[in-house]
């Protein structure tokens, strides 16, 4: 793995968001489309995540997650993803990274 400088790392905009809505992406077992709230400054947006084998849409609504907010948009199975959620990988199983206390939507992760 290649090291990056601290200055390069600071370019990554990590934020806290709350999941407002979640639904499976049609035609995929793995992909879930999430409507998230990033607070007043950044508003709401959609992200698509490959967590559908572990998390049901009902389990996700209301959870706070950590996202990469400044990732360029990407289209997955016809759905635009405007960011990426962060998850640990335990033996191929995604585990969402979450704050241990409720924080304001849009809060920066430092």
Image (tube, grey):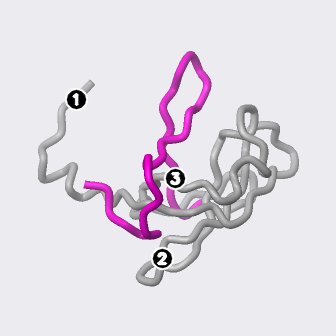
- Mark in front: 3 vs 1: 3
Separation of marks 1 and 2 at Cα, in angstroms: 34 Å
- Mark in front: 1 vs 2: 2
- Neighbours of disc 2 within 10 Å: few (<14), some (14-19), many (20+): some
Majority secondary structure of the magenta segment? loop
The residue at 71%/33% (across/down) is 54
- Between 35 and 11, which is closer to the camera in this rendering? 35
- Neighbours of disc 3 within 10 Å: few (<14), some (14-19), many (20+): many
Separation of marks 3 and 1 at Cα, in angstroms: 27 Å
Q: Closer to the N terminus: mark 2 or mark 3? A: 2
Q: Closer to the N terminus: mark 3 or mark 1? A: 1
In the shown orientation, is residue 83 left or right of residue 36? left
Which quadrant, please, contains the C terminus?
A: bottom left
- Neighbours of disc 1 within 10 Å: few (<14), some (14-19), many (20+): few
In this view, which residue lies farthest toward the front? 101
Residue occupied by mark 2: 39
Q: Judge whether 26 appears above or below 16 on screen.
A: above
Q: Is residue 39 magenta?
A: no
Q: Which mark is residue 78?
A: none
Q: Which residues are magenta?
A: 81-110
- Between 59 and 88, which is closer to the camera in this rendering? 59
Q: Is residue 96 magenta?
A: yes
Q: Judge whether 68 appears above or below 54 on screen.
A: below
Q: Position of residue 60 (x, y in %)?
A: 69, 51
Residue occupied by mark 3: 65
The residue at 74%/47% (across/down) is 59
Residue occupied by mark 1: 2
Q: Position of residue 44 (x, y in %)?
A: 57, 75
In the shown orientation, is residue 1 left or right of residue 106? left
The residue at 67%/66% (across/down) is 20
Separation of marks 2 and 3 at Cα, in angstroms: 13 Å
């Amino acid at each position: 793995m290649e090291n990056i400088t601290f200055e390069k790392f600071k370019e990554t905009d990590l934020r806290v968001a709350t999941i407002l809505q979640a639904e499976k992406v049609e035609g995929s077992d793995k992909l879930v489309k999430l409507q998230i709230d990033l607070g007043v400054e950044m508003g709401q947006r959609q992200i698509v995540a490959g967590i559908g084998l572990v998390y049901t849409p009902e389990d996700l609504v209301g959870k706070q997650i950590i996202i990469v907010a400044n990732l360029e948009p990407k289209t997955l199975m016809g759905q635009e993803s405007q960011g990426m959620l962060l998850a640990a990988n335990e033996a191929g199983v995604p585990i969402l990274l979450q704050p241990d206390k409720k924080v304001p939507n849009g809060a920066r992760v430092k």
